[in-house]
Image (cartoon, helix red, strand yellow):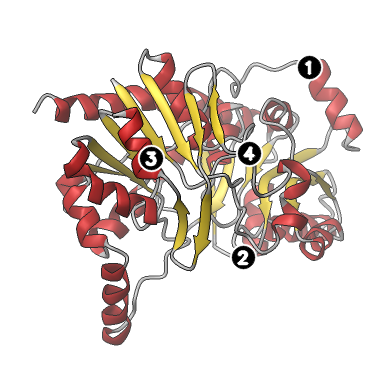
C-alpha cells in the first residue's frame, strides 16, 4: 500500500506522531511518503526564537525530497495566514505520489480541507486524526457563541471535510466527545486511537551507571524522590504548578522531594520554576536521552494538558500524576493518580502519597506493561492499517 502522511510541520529528532508513524508504516512493508512544510514544529509561535530555536535551529529549513530509512520526506515551501499553514504544491505532490491512502493530523486545517476537496479527483482514501482535548478546547456556551462557532467552522470547510474523510481517529475519549458533539461527526465515523510510544527506545530496561551519574550531575541524592516534567514551559502546560507543589512540600519539611523540569520556556517562565525550592531546570534533550531522564526520576507529573510524554514515562516504569479534568481513565488506571486541577496543595498531597518505593515500582510495572501491549507504534500502525484495509476492500 502506498501511504501519504501530511503534516503542517516537521522537525528531526522529535518524539511526535509525524516522526514515528511514518517509520512504523514503513517497517510493516508499505511505501510511505511524509509531506510537510518547510517549517519546524512551533515555527509560528511568537516566542520561537527564544524557546525553540536553541534546540531546533532556524524556523524555516531547506525544501526538497529526503530519503529516510523507512519513508521519504517531502518538504515544500509554505506560508502562514490567520487560518493556518498552507503547504504550496500539495496537489502536485498528490499527483506525483499517487497514494492509496492519505493520513492527516487535525480536522480544521487548511491542508485537510484541500485534501478533502481533492479526494474525488485523485481517488484515495482519506483519514484524519484529531487531538481536540477538552484541556485546549473552549466550546461555545450560549446561543450567540454557538451561532458564531458554527459560522466559523463552516467558513473553515468543516462540511466538506466531514463529507470526504473516510474515518476520523480521535486520540482519546474526550476528543471523541468533542468532535462528535461540537463538530457533529457521526459516532460510527470515528475510531478512538491513542498516541503511541517507541517501545524500542522507551522501556523499563535501564543502565544503573548512567542513571546514577545523571542524578549526581543534577544534584540529587540517593534518597531523593524526583518528580519529572518534560516538554514546553508555558501557561497552557503549567509545569509551574508542579514546582510550587515541590516548594510547598519543602516548606512542610519533606525536603527529599525534588522537581526536575526538562524543556524550555520564556526566560520569565523558566525563572519562576528555577526560583522554587527543590527544583532543577535543564534544557530539552534528544529523544535518545529521554529514557535515561525518566529512569533517573521516580514520578512523572503533567499538571495540565495531555502529552505523549506521559506515555513515554509510563513505558519507562514511572507512576504518573495528572489533573482530574483528564478523561482517559483506562490509560492511567492502576498506574496513575489525579489531583484537583490547579490545586498546588492537592498535587503535593498526591506526590506525598507516592513516598513508598514499592508502591511506585508496582504502579510503574502496570504502566510499562500496558504501554508495551496497547500503545507501541507498531501496535498502533497495525490497528490503523486494519482500518485502511477494511475500507479498501469495500
**Mark 1 and mark 4: Cα distance apart in space:** 40 Å
For disc 2, the marked residue is 343
Asked whether 254 or 179 is in front, the reply is: 179
Q: Marks 3 and 4: in contact by CB < 8 Å? A: no
Q: Residue extending furthest bottom?
A: 144
Residue 384 place in picture, x, y as percent: 30, 29
Q: Which residue is mark 1?
A: 208
* Distance in Å between CA atoms under marks 2 and 4: 45 Å
* 185 in relation to 148, above or below: above
What is the spatial separation of the Cα atoms under label 2 and label 1, in whole angstroms?
A: 35 Å
Q: Is residue 370 visible?
A: no
Q: Which mark is residue 330?
A: 3
| Residue 321 falls left or right of residue 268 | left
Q: Which mark is residue 62?
A: 4
Residue for point 79% across, 44% down: 283
Q: Earlier in the sequence, mark 4 or mark 3?
A: 4
Image location (x, y in percent) of residue 311:
53, 35
Whole-number angstrom distance, CA of label 1 to CA of label 3: 31 Å
Q: Earlier in the sequence, mark 2 or mark 4?
A: 4
**Regarding mark 2 in the picture, which secondary structure is present there?**
loop
Spatial CA distance of label 4 from label 3 is 42 Å
State the image quarter where residue 214 is shown: top right
Mark 1, secondary structure of its residue? helix
Nearer the observer, 227 or 47: 47
Amino acid at each position: 500500500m502506498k501511504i501519504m502522511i501530511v503534516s503542517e510541520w516537521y522537525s528531526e529528532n522529535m518524539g511526535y506522531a509525524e516522526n514515528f508513524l511514518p517509520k512504523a508504516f514503513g517497517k510493516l512493508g508499505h511505501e510511505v511518503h511524509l509531506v510537510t512544510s518547510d517549517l519546524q514544529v512551533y515555527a509560528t509561535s511568537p516566542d520561537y526564537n527564544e524557546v525553540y530555536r536553541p534546540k531546533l535551529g532556524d524556523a524555516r529549513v531547506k525544501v526538497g525530497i529526503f530519503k529516510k530509512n523507512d519513508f521519504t520526506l517531502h518538504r515544500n515551501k509554505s506560508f502562514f495566514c490567520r487560518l493556518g499553514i498552507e503547504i504550496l504544491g500539495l496537489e502536485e505532490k498528490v499527483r506525483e505520489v499517487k497514494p492509496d491512502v492519505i493520513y492527516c493530523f487535525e480536522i480544521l486545517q487548511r491542508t485537510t480541507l484541500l485534501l478533502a476537496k481533492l479526494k474525488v479527483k485523485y481517488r484515495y482514501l482519506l483519514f484524519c486524526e484529531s487531538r481536540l482535548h477538552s484541556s485546549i478546547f473552549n466550546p461555545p456556551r450560549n446561543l450567540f457563541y454557538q451561532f458564531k462557532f458554527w459560522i466559523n467552522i463552516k467558513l473553515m470547510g468543516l462540511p466538506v471535510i466531514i463529507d470526504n474523510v473516510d474515518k476520523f481517529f480521535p486520540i482519546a475519549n474526550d476528543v471523541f466527545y468533542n468532535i462528535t458533539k461540537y463538530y457533529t461527526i457521526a459516532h460510527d465515523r470515528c475510531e478512538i486511537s491513542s498516541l503511541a510510544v517507541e517501545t524500542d527506545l522507551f522501556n523499563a530496561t535501564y543502565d544503573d551507571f548512567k542513571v546514577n551519574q545523571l542524578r549526581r550531575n543534577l544534584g540529587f541524592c540517593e534518597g531523593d524522590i524526583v518528580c519529572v516534567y518534560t516538554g514546553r514551559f508555558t501557561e497552557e502546560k503549567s509545569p509551574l504548578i508542579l514546582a510550587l507543589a515541590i516548594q510547598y512540600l519543602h516548606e512542610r519539611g519533606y525536603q527529599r522531594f525534588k522537581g526536575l523540569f526538562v524543556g524550555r520556556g520564556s526566560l520569565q517562565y523558566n525563572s519562576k520554576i528555577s526560583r522554587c525550592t527543590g527544583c532543577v531546570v535543564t534544557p530539552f534533550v534528544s529523544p535518545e536521552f529521554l529514557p535515561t531522564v525518566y529512569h533517573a526520576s521516580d514520578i512523572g507529573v503533567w499538571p495540565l494538558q495531555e502529552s505523549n510524554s506521559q506515555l513515554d514515562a509510563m513505558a519507562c516504569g514511572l507512576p504518573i500524576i495528572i489533573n482530574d479534568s483528564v478523561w482517559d481513565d483506562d490509560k492511567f488506571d492502576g498506574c496513575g493518580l489525579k489531583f484537583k486541577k490547579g490545586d498546588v496543595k492537592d498535587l503535593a498531597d498526591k506526590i506525598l502519597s507516592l513516598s513508598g518505593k514499592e508502591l511506585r515500582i508496582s504502579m510503574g510495572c502496570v504502566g510499562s506493561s500496558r504501554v508495551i501491549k496497547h500503545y507501541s507504534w507498531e501496535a498502533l500502525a497495525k490497528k490503523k492499517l486494519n482500518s485502511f484495509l477494511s475500507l479498501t476492500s469495500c
